[in-house]
Image (cartoon, rainbow, N blue to C red):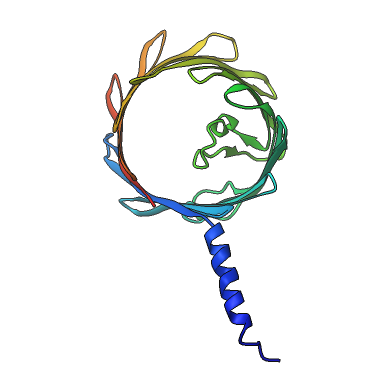
Amino acid sequence: MRMKWWVLPFMFLAFASMAQEISFSGAVGMDFLFTPASSFSMQSALTLTMDVGKGGVKSQTILSLTGLEAEHLWLWLNFQGVTLKSGLTFDPCFSRWTLSASGGCCAFFLGGTFLLGNLAHICQTPDYTIGLILEFGVGGEPGFLARSLTGFGVSGLYALIDGDPWTDVTLVPGWFFEEELLHFVWSTQCLRVYTTWMFAYTGLGFGELGVNYRFTQPIVDLGAALRFNSTLSLAWAKLYLGVSVDPVSVYSATAFNFSGLLWEEIGIKIQFSQVLIYSTTRFDLSGLDWIAVGFELKF
């Protein structure tokens, strides 16, 4: 049966209405990392992000002077208070596949992440392993926030605190308990106090305490953090100072211990409408460690 001619206008109006309801935004950026060590090296990363309606995709391609280093791809979908994410990493051969689901009700939230990884050297005979991360939390910011992260066959859970998908955890052989991370935050519009404790199967791994205060007009951020090792002796201390006067933001971060300076990091960001330009430099007592420069264009 052929479609009636009068159905076509209604279909057109329906698709037009759906298109108006679907929001579209994104960003494209590129940064360059220079490491002037004994042998000079350079890496560049091209990042593309697109948000379409309740889903999105993010791609990061890492190149060096020798060619393709890695490719990271993330896809996500939000519906009914649940977020699904899937990620693939190549370096440049298959390295990792990640699938996670998270959601919550009222003040509670739950999450789980499954990882399938290749422990073999780059592009050698595959050596597959799996890992699992369980997350439980209550509260939010500003206010009180408590999070628990448990890793089986996975270490480096501290990398997940900032929510950055590019800070990877580490898969290890075997599917056994590796780490338990406890993170507590109390924050207001100006003050943020936190403590983080990591436990391994051998006992305490480290503890961290930190505080940050923000002044307004102009915006000034002052922060300090202390990390203690498994014997509760000082591993390092950090001091942070950031100043923002539109369109420029600058910051300085210093890490040191009882032996002296560990590293100093200085960064600057310039934001013009939808364009962001930034630069970060890190050095220690032996000299320059690395320099990163980049830009991001939002659309």
Task: Give the x, y percent position of residue 54.
Answer: 59, 52
**Quadrant in the picture for residue 242:** top left
Task: Give the x, y percent position of residue 136.
Answer: 71, 31
* Res. 17 visible in picture: yes
**102 left or right of 63?**
right
Compared with 122, 34 (above or below) is above
Task: Give the x, y percent position of residue 122.
Answer: 49, 51
**56 left or right of 257?**
right
Q: Residue at x 60, y 32 (%)?
A: 157
Task: Give the x, y percent position of residue 161.
Answer: 56, 30
Compared with 252, 9 (above or below) is below
Q: Residue at x 42, y 8 (%)?
A: 258
Compared with 75, 159 (above or below) is above
* Res. 48 visible in picture: no
Q: Residue at x 65, y 87 (%)?
A: 4
**93 left or right of 36?**
right
Q: Nearer the viewer, residue 197 or 247?
A: 247
Compared with 104, 93 (above or below) is below
- Position of the N terminus, as image quadrant, is bottom right
Q: Nearer the viewer, residue 263 or 269?
A: 269
